[in-house]
């Protein structure tokens, strides 16, 4: 009755492995969209320098914590890869923006001038200074000359031909011309098609990466089944490794919590920069989308843990499984805190994207 499910072995260990493989696949490609976006725009103005630097420091502490805590070698290799990718992204920012450790915001043209108030004069001093004086105007025409020019037949015909009688009727409101309306109507479908194209491309990229993660899990489990000639001594050795993975390493835990705090703090400069710019232009949403999916699947892979008791998996005494699971969560809590916290903050970047999308055009 359950032969298909048993053949696939979709237990908690398999579910945790699938989520973990998808998380690894997302984190492998997470930096690529932003690096490509910066190269395409020849600019890195959308990224916060402080965000990248703090993230880099967090990855360094992640390496130290992972080595001291004794996590899987693949996770240590990935932590080193993250650090190298951070350095590449930081060097790219320095190349396009110059060596700077601060985020500079260029005001928009409509934000350069002060907003009008009830007490502000209609003509400020700058406008008054730019107003041409009667003595210095080189194109000033005397009144008799103006009467002579306006009374000539050719001048009257030219003035009549240049007039637009669209708004002469009181029934016709002041509105953009027909050509302007047609341009606006033609522009709207183009914008909709570009947004739809971007959504479809991002969805396809996410599906491909997730599928690659699932395929990687399937290939690894298939290879493990084909080479499964484990002896009793090997089972005992695996049991000892599992017990050691639940051992608290104080320096490793300290570095893990420092890493989590740095990961959480790295998002704040980016959120503040987006708020100050009132724009998310220059940021690849696929960059943060892969980060969100990678953090979410990583958290789920930790939660989907099947406790291994002294007598083996599924042979726990009363309350033993709960104690083992609680200790496992306590060992990995710093990594859970960093991943789940950055997941929430990355969701704030998406909120800013939809808020400022109209301003970005």
Image: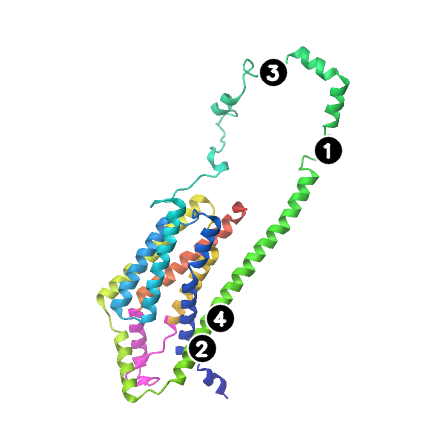
Verify whether residue 320 appears in magenta: yes
Left or right of 180, for residue 78: left
Left or right of 293, for residue 329: left
161 to 149, vertically: above or below: below
Q: Residue at x 47, y 70 (%)?
A: 212
Res. 319 in view: no
Is disc 3 placed on a helix, strand or loop?
Answer: loop
Name the residue nearer the viewer: 183 or 120.
183
Q: Which residue is mark 3?
A: 140
Mark 2 and mark 3 in contact (Cβ < 8 Å)?
no
Q: CA distance from mark 2 to mark 1?
A: 70 Å
Q: Position of residue 128 (x, y in %)?
A: 50, 21
Mark 1 and mark 2 in contact (Cβ < 8 Å)?
no
Q: Position of residue 53 (x, y in %)?
A: 33, 52
Q: Which residues are magenta?
A: 302-331
On the image, which quarter does residue 334 sit in?
bottom left
Q: CA distance from mark 4 to mark 1?
A: 60 Å
Dot 4: few (<14), some (14–19), or many (≥20) neighbours within 10 Å? Answer: some
Q: CA distance from mark 3 to mark 1?
A: 30 Å
Is disc 4 placed on a helix, strand or loop?
Answer: helix
Q: Which residue is mark 4?
A: 211
On the image, which quarter does residue 330 sit in?
bottom left
Badge 4 or badge 2: first in the primary sequence: 4
Q: Residue at x 69, y 35 (%)?
A: 173
């Amino acid at each position: 009755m359950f032969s298909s499910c048993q053949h696939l072995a979709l237990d908690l260990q398999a579910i945790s492995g699938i989520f973990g493989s998808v998380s690894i696949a997302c984190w492998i490609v997470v930096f690529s969209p932003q690096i490509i976006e910066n190269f395409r725009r020849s600019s890195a103005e959308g990224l916060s320098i402080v965000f990248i630097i703090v993230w880099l420091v967090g990855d360094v502490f992640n390496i130290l914590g992972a080595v001291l805590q004794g996590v899987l070698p693949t996770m240590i290799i990935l932590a080193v890869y993250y650090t190298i990718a951070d350095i590449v992204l930081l060097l790219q920012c320095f190349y396009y923006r110059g060596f700077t450790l601060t985020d500079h915001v260029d005001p928009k043209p409509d934000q350069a001038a002060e907003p009008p108030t009830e007490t502000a004069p209609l003509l400020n001093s700058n406008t008054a200074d730019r107003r041409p004086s009667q003595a210095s105007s080189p194109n000033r025409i005397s009144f008799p000359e103006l009467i002579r020019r306006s009374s000539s037949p050719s001048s009257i015909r030219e003035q009549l031909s240049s007039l637009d009688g669209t708004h002469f009727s009181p029934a016709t409101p002041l509105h953009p011309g027909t050509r302007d309306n047609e341009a606006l109507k033609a522009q709207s479908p183009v914008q909709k098609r570009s947004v739809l194209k971007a959504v479809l491309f991002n969805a396809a990229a996410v599906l491909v990466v997730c599928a690659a993660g699932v395929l990687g899990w399937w290939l690894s489990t298939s290879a493990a089944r084909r080479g499964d000639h484990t002896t009793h001594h090997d089972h005992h050795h695996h049991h000892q490794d599992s017990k050691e993975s639940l051992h608290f390493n104080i320096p490793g835990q300290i570095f893990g919590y420092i890493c989590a705090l740095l990961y959480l703090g790295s998002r704040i400069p980016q959120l503040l920069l987006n708020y100050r710019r009132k724009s998310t232009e220059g940021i690849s949403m696929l960059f943060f989308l892969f980060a969100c999916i990678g953090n979410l699947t990583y958290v789920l892979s930790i939660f989907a843990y099947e406790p291994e008791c002294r007598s083996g998996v599924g042979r726990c005494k009363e309350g033993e499984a709960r104690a083992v699971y609680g200790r496992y969560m306590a060992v990995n809590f710093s990594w859970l805190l960093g991943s789940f916290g950055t997941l929430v903050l990355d969701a704030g970047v998406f909120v800013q994207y939809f808020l400022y999308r109209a301003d970005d055009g």
